[in-house]
Image: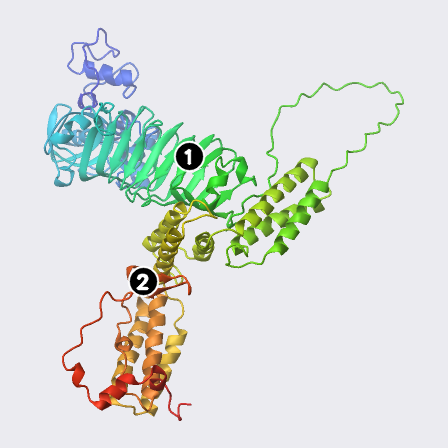
């Protein structure tokens, strides 16, 4: 009776009994028939044995069947059964006992686990309650801090109070949940399946204005969450398992502030939108034809797998580390920055103006023009091709096509002498076009040198990419087995690449600088080891670089003022990254510390020189000590600055005419690098320089009354101050 009621079985009075020892008039008959109909309890032969006690192993078998633990095992962290505990169990019950133990159904037995021992009333109630907690139940009503399930209203724990509120009642109506209930209080939500649905936004309403909304208030679901209802908004919820946007979602899904520890499955939605704002995701799988997904407001994820044709949008705050386009995808529209994308190239790929790909991995070598639909417009938005500098065109190989071939039955040939079969000579391959393309390519290489002069030189990146195509084309020419199709393709590709090289001489300074930065800074990876950078630094740089490329759509044409602005921003971006590369070279600083200490011993100097030098030595030693305990916290820029300051202090101490020392020598070695906002790009020197002060500093009182000696000191040239002593020379 306990099990039948707990699992909500139909207990209408049976018309006949299935057991010879249980009449239909018995109070236990409806429950016994309900359990039999489910296949959970069959009795013993034709007898039910209503007065016989239930044993632990019998109870385990019934509950394991009720929860389908064979097909859907549950592990709640409970201890497994030992071999000694299972030794006395019946063979037919051993699997169910193991499953029930893992699900935590055997923890209420006060005298321990003995499979043949009879179950007491309290123990039975405990086991059935534990099983009830594991089954999905429908939410009947929700008030602030209260949820009603199975006709019983339960209080919820404080950390779930944000989920079970009156405001969330419409979204939770009819939802299926799997709860942990302890002493009448809901202490955990293990599974949540949202069934409620909203409506399309009415005219005049904002997008998603008709959605039914659930605000979790930061509550945590320990297991999986499924969104089965259409037009749903899900906010501020932490999900310990998977998040599934079910196939029943035919239109919109919106979210803000989700944290998903498992995999996010997008099985629903359409060419409207599935939106994630400020989300923290792990793996994301897109498996709905023509779905459109948006990642906004600094949403983060580790990887995305695209299994069906889809569209992906992202704002400038988002960067996708890994994007895998699986075989079978017909088309994919990308308008978001991607670090690494992999595809077989057998699809239509369209890049939007905000799209960028740092490294495009293609598992079959295909000409990019064959699958990137707008290649001519977006080719500058791709940095690397198969880990090498991106080439404007790569030679292709024919895509193998599998065809069914009819095999005729064997023909019995009579033993007669037949003349030998002479195959016609193979048609010779025409190499003239490829030879002409190679000759023109060699000529193009000699026309201009590599350099930075617009109109008078080729960019280095363009020349390197061109040489790759040239080498591949020469290999086709040298291949005695090359087909006419392969030769024609190589010639066509080389002609396009040659024209692209000649066009590159007109690439603007900003185009050349962006290409150079893409290759130069690709070596810096995220981590805490030497020569690595933090995730935020990495994201800031590559997002900034992608933005600059978007604002430079034509590689050969740009307004001078705009180019100056972009060059300035690029220099600041590079400076910001270089200032935050984890230090790797301490040896020069260690050597200079030793020289500085010797200088203190060997040369008395003056008070003006000893104190600054001692302070600089101490700051340098502190930095070297910190490098042994927290190496990830020190940037190479900091080490270089400290080295420069220590060298200046040492030279000043050795100067027999020393009088004063700049305060920069005493600066904190861990002080941050100058802010990019305080710097300006110098087009002539190609470096950043401090912005001039808005107004000259006011002279301090007493400046006009300086003595002649002071005036002499202030007028000494830096070269005089830095002159070493004869002994030092």
- Left or right? Give the position of 309 relative to 174: right
Classify residue 396 by image quadrant.
top right
Quadrant assignment, res 671: bottom left
Q: Can residue 133 be seen in this view?
A: no
Of residues 179 and 492, the one nearer the viewer is 492
Q: In which quarter of the image is the N terminus?
A: top left
Q: Position of residue 129 (x, y in %)?
A: 18, 30
Q: Quadrant of residue 138?
A: top left
Q: Which element carries disc 1, helix, strand or loop?
A: strand
- Report the front residue among 384 and 227: 384
Q: Are marks 2 and 1 in contact (CB under 8 Å)?
A: no
Give the label, 2 or 1, closer to the camera: 2
- Count neighbours of disc 2 (C-alpha within 10 A) and say few if under 14, some if 14 to 19, many if 20 or more: some
Q: Is residue 277 visible?
A: yes
* Residue 236 pos. (x, y %): 21, 39
Mark 1 crowdedness (10 Å alpha carbons): few <14, some 14-19, many ≥20: many
- Residue 679 got which mark? 2
- Residue 104 position within the rendered picture, expressed as x and y whole percent measured from the top left: 24, 36
| Residue visible at 22% across and 13% down in the picture | 21
Residue for point 52% across, 34% down: 346
Image quarter in which the C terminus is found: bottom left
Considering depth in this image, is 135 or 274 the residue closer to the camera?
A: 274
In what element is the residue under mark 2? strand
Q: Estimate the spatial distance between the alpha carbons at disc 2 and disc 1, rounded to whole Å.
A: 39 Å
Q: Which of marks 2 and 1 is nearer the N terminus?
A: 1
Residue 87 locus on image (x, y percent): 32, 37
Above/below status of 276 relative to 613: above
The residue lying furthest to the top in this view is 15
- Mark number displayed over residue 333: 1
445 vs 86, left or right, is right
Relative horizontal placement of residue 280, taking residue 154 as reference (left or right): right
């Amino acid at each position: 009776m306990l099990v039948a009621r707990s699992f909500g079985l139909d207990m209408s009075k049976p018309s006949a009994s299935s057991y010879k020892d249980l009449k239909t008039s018995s109070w236990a008959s409806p429950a016994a028939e309900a359990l039999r109909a489910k296949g959970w309890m069959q009795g013993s032969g034709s007898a039910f044995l209503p007065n016989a006690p239930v044993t632990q192993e019998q109870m385990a078998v019934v509950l394991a069947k009720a929860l389908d633990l064979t097909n859907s095992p549950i592990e709640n962290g409970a201890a497994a059964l030992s071999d000694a505990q299972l030794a006395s169990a019946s063979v037919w019950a051993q699997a169910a006992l193991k499953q029930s133990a893992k699900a935590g159904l055997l923890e209420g037995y006060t005298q321990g686990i003995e499979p043949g021992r009879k179950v007491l009333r309290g123990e039975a109630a405990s086991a059935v309650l534990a099983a009830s907690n594991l089954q999905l139940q429908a939410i009947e009503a929700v008030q602030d801090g209260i949820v009603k399930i199975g006709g019983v209203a339960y209080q919820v724990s404080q950390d779930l109070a944000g989920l079970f509120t009156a405001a969330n009642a419409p979204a939770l109506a009819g939802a299926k949940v799997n709860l942990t209930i302890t002493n009448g209080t809901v202490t955990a939500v293990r599974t949540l399946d949202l069934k409620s649905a909203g409506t399309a936004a009415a005219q005049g309403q904002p997008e998603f204005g008709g959605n039914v909304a659930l605000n979790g208030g930061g509550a945590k679901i320990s297991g999986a969450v499924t969104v089965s209802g259409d037009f749903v908004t899900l906010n501020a919820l932490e999900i310990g398992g998977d998040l599934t946007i079910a196939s029943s979602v035919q239109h919109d899904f919106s979210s803000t502030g989700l944290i998903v520890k498992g995999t996010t499955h997008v099985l629903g939605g359409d060419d409207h939108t599935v939106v994630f704002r400020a989300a923290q995701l792990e793996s994301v799988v897109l498996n709905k034809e023509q779905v459109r997904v948006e990642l906004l407001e600094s949403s983060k994820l580790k990887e995305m797998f695209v299994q069906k044709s889809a569209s992906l949008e992202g704002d400038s705050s988002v960067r996708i580390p890994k994007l895998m386009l699986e075989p079978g995808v017909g088309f994919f529209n990308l308008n978001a920055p991607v670090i690494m994308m992999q595809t077989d190239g057998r699809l239509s790929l369209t890049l939007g103006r905000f799209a960028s790909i740092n490294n495009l991995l293609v598992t079959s070598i295909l000409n990019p023009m064959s699958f990137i639909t707008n290649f001519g417009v977006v080719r500058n938005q791709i940095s690397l091709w198969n880990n090498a500098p991106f080439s404007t065109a790569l030679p292709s190989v024919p895509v193998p096509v599998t065809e069914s071939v009819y095999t005729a039955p064997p023909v019995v040939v009579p033993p007669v002498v037949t003349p030998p079969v002479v195959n016609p000579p193979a048609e010779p391959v025409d190499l003239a076009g490829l030879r002409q393309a190679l000759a023109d390519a060699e000529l193009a290489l000699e026309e201009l040198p590599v350099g930075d002069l617009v109109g008078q030189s080729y960019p280095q990146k363009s020349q390197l990419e061109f040489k790759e195509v040239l080498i591949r084309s020469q290999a086709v020419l040298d291949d005695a087995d090359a087909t006419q199709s392969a030769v024609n393709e190589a010639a066509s590709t080389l002609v396009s690449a040659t024209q692209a090289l000649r066009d590159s001489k007109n690439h603007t300074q900003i185009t050349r600088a962006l290409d150079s930065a893409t290759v130069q800074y690709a070596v810096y990876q995220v981590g805490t080891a030497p020569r690595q950078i933090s995730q935020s630094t990495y994201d800031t740089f590559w997002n900034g670089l992608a933005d600059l490329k978007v604002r430079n759509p034509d590689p050969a044409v740009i307004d001078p003022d705009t180019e100056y602005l972009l060059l300035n921003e690029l220099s600041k971006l590079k400076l910001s990254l270089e200032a935050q590369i984890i230090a790797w070279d301490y040896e020069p600083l260690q050597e200079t510390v030793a020289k500085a200490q010797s200088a203190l011993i060997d040369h008395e100097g003056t008070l003006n020189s000893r104190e600054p030098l001692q302070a600089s030595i101490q700051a340098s030693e502190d930095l070297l000590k910190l490098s042994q305990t927290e190496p990830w916290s020190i940037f190479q820029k900091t080490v270089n600055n400290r080295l420069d300051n220590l060298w200046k202090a040492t030279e000043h101490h050795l100067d027999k005419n020393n009088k004063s020392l700049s305060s920069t020598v005493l600066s904190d070695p861990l002080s941050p690098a100058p802010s990019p906002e305080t710097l300006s790009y110098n087009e002539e020197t190609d470096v950043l320089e401090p912005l001039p002060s808005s107004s000259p500093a006011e002279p301090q009182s007493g400046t006009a009354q300086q003595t002649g000696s002071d005036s002499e000191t202030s007028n000494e040239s830096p070269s005089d101050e830095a002159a070493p002593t004869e002994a030092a020379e």
